[in-house]
């Protein structure tokens, strides 16, 4: 799969996942009344993160928001926080991924910058998906615990022969929407991180070779300097200086005693 295709597919999956997270957070059917062995069927109750609703057999539905925050269970507030954090991170990652798409050119943006933006959006999508899955799973665990506790309390008195009427709640449609949305967002984030490798510029590996200029040997002779190649047998009376080249005037300013013979 090419980098552009992988990036576009991840972008579309992330959009669907983010839309699902928003829809699941706003839905009222996080928990629905369990109608199994329930003699009262004229009233159907269901609850969400923000309000509880009652639907009568006549079709009339009445919803009441939660007017308190401190009075709500701590687990419900934790689920709210996880879903909101997931939506915010997903929205930010979506904005970043729009500018990181390879098929969109903005000015003179280099591929390395797009690679960094793609990786950033992918990490945000992964965290967003994990927050959504964690929030839905925590709420589902709370429902399972309350369901079995309610079931145990239904059979009390006279050795369990008398069944009391008690409302039990089971999984609602919002839980399944949240699980699917979190999974899509998570997959989109992973594909974004994979597409980042295709956008990163390839590094060229080469062996560096250093070149050093060979020094020139200068031979001193009475009456001037002469460059020596180091070959030949007539260099017996020559004095070699490695400190660097000297000018002819500088050499004559220091005459030797043999010049006066």
Image (cartoon, grey):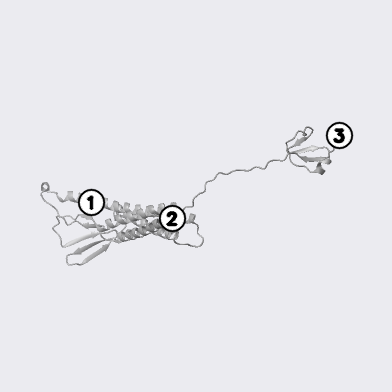
Disc 3 target residue = 258
Determine the residue located farthest toward the front in the rendered image.
232
Q: Are marks 1 and 2 in contact (CB under 8 Å)?
A: no
Determine the residue located farthest toward the right in the rendered image.
261
Q: Position of residue 62 (x, y in %)?
A: 23, 65
Of tags 3 and 2, which is closer to the observer? 3
In the displayed structure, 212 sits above or below 176; it is above
Disc 1 target residue = 146
Is residue 77 shown to the viewer in this render? no
Tally the marks: 3
The first of marks 1 and 2 along the sequence is 2
Question: Judging from the image, what secondary structure is the residue with disc 1 in?
Answer: helix
Question: Judging from the image, what secondary structure is the residue with disc 3 in?
Answer: helix
Q: Residue at x 24, y 62 (%)?
A: 53
The first of marks 3 and 1 along the sequence is 1
Q: Are marks 3 and 2 in contact (CB under 8 Å)?
A: no
In the displayed structure, 182 sits above or below 219; it is below
**Label 3 to label 1: alpha-carbon separation:** 117 Å
Picture quadrant of residue 238: top right
In the displayed structure, 29 sits above or below 216; it is below
The first of marks 3 and 2 along the sequence is 2
Is residue 61 shown to the viewer in this render? yes
Q: Nearer the viewer, residue 253 or 163?
A: 253
Picture quadrant of residue 104: bottom left
Lateral position of residue 205 relative to residue 249, left or right: left
Q: Position of residue 20 (x, y in %)?
A: 32, 59
Lateral position of residue 124 relative to residue 220, left or right: left
Picture quadrant of residue 5: bottom left
Disc 2 target residue = 118
């Amino acid at each position: 799969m090419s980098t552009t295709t992988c990036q576009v597919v991840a972008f579309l999956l992330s959009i669907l996942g983010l839309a699902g997270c928003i829809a699941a957070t706003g839905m009222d059917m996080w928990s629905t009344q369990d109608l199994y062995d329930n003699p009262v069927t004229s009233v159907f109750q269901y609850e969400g993160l923000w309000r509880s609703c009652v639907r009568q057999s006549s079709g009339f539905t009445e919803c009441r928001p939660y007017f308190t925050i401190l009075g709500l269970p701590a687990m419900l507030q934790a689920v709210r926080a996880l879903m909101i954090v997931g939506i915010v991170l997903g929205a930010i990652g979506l904005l970043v991924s729009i500018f990181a798409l390879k098929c969109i050119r903005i000015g003179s943006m280099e591929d390395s910058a797009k690679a960094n933006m793609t990786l950033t959006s992918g990490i945000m999508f992964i965290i967003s998906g994990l927050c959504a899955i964690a929030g839905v799973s925590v709420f589902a665990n709370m429902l399972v615990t309350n369901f079995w506790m309610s079931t145990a309390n239904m059979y009390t008195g006279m050795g369990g022969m008398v069944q009391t009427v008690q409302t039990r709640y089971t999984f609602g449609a919002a839980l399944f929407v949240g699980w699917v949305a979190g999974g899509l967002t998570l997959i989109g984030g992973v594909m974004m991180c994979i597409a980042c490798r295709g956008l990163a510029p390839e590094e060229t590996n080469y062996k560096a070779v250093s070149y050093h200029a060979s020094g020139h040997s200068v031979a001193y002779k009475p009456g001037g300097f002469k460059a020596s190649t180091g070959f030949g047998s007539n260099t017996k009376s020559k004095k070699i200086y490695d400190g660097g080249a000297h000018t002819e005037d500088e050499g004559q300013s220091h005459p030797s005693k043999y010049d006066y013979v």
